[in-house]
Image (cartoon, rainbow, N blue to C red):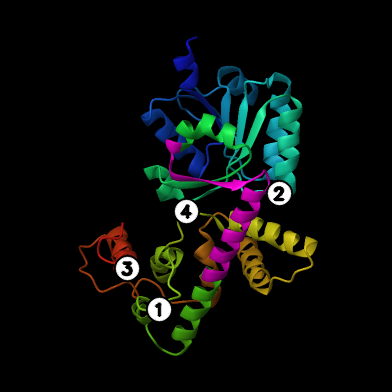
Amino acid sequence: MSARQNKLIVGVIGLGIIGERVVTNLRKSGFQVWIWNRSPRAQPNFVPSAKEVADAAKCIQFFVSDGPALLSVLDELLPVLTSEHIILSHATISPQETLEAAKKVEERGAKFLEAPFTGSRDAAEKGELIYYIGGSAEVLEKVRPLLSASSKDILHLGEIGHASTVKIATNLINAASIQAVAEAFALLHCSNIPLQKLVEAMKYNAALSPVMAMKFPGMMNGDFNPSFSLKHMFKDIQHALRLAVQHGLEFPAASSFAGSAISGIQQGWGNLDYSVISRHFNLPIAQQITQTSDATSSEEKEKSISWSLFGSNKK
């Protein structure tokens, strides 16, 4: 096999909302991709085991759900890992789990990078994820081309464990923001004020963020098709709360979201978008969407809200 052919071979383990879209972008960029998922998929180069991915590819991207899943699959791979392998962990897991995974890989002589990302389903589909990297800058340069296939930026944040901590911190902010939006909508509803009025007011408010603009439409029309599920956000906030305990801190905002999340999960909302916590307040739906013609699609109505908040050219 030539050096060029070897460069174009990538392994992907985990075909969830993000992993499946990353595979598509890798293939569009000319990479040959070998894949494995616990639930079999009818896709090209799907192999029966994770070991066979490592046999076929030296660079392997992991898009698994949590730390135990990562460590379990790594244990299956360890016997076949060599000094030529590079493992990239994209799961949002605790720094401790990240360090444990790195130790397992490096004891086999292989390389390890943590690479959690920001960006949801739509960003992954467009190849516009942002990767947070912890680990060797030299190893990062070796895998930069394959990461670039599914991202618009790659941030090197320090040593292994640092990227996981930063990602948990960003999700803490996102979760608290959407909890606040749900409460703000509830306040307007109980005051007999249309929810759309908050959207209009927030357009001129310094607190407005892209995640708020993204979540407003679904929270207003009751559409919680997941771009990031409640169960996964709950997992990440649990990591934040454990880190708070380790550092002797108290995180009331994280605790509040965790309470809303576990209640929602108990009601069967775990696979819905995490903005589904707004259901706790029994908000009115559908009629709150901006007044557009009946012929306008639901998706177009949602975009009209999000784009108007950040200017007509926001996409």
Q: Residues within 10 Å of mark 2 (few under 14, many from 20)?
A: many
Q: Which residue is mark 4?
A: 227
- Which is in the foreground here, disc 1 or disc 3? 1
Q: Which residue is mark 2?
A: 95
Q: Residues within 10 Å of mark 1 (few under 14, many from 20)?
A: few
Lower position in the chain sequence, tag 1 or tag 3 = 1
Indicate the secondary structure of the residue bearing disc 4.
loop
Against 70, is 172 above or below?
below
Indicate the secondary structure of the residue bearing disc 1.
loop
Q: Label 3, label 4: how many angstroms apart (C-alpha)?
A: 17 Å
Where is residue 269, by image quadrant?
Answer: bottom right
Indicate the secondary structure of the residue bearing disc 3.
helix
Q: Check residue 234 for magenta coloring.
A: no
- Which is in the foreground here, disc 2 or disc 4? 2
Q: Which residue is mark 3?
A: 305
Residue beneath the point at 56% across and 73% down: 280
Q: Residues within 10 Å of mark 4 (few under 14, many from 20)?
A: some
Q: Check residue 155 for magenta coloring.
A: yes
Bounds of the magenta segment: 148-177
Where is residue 271, by image quadrant?
Answer: bottom right
Residue beneath the point at 68% across and 47% down: 161
Question: Residue 315 placed where, x, y %?
Answer: 31, 56
Name which residue type carries label 1.
Asn
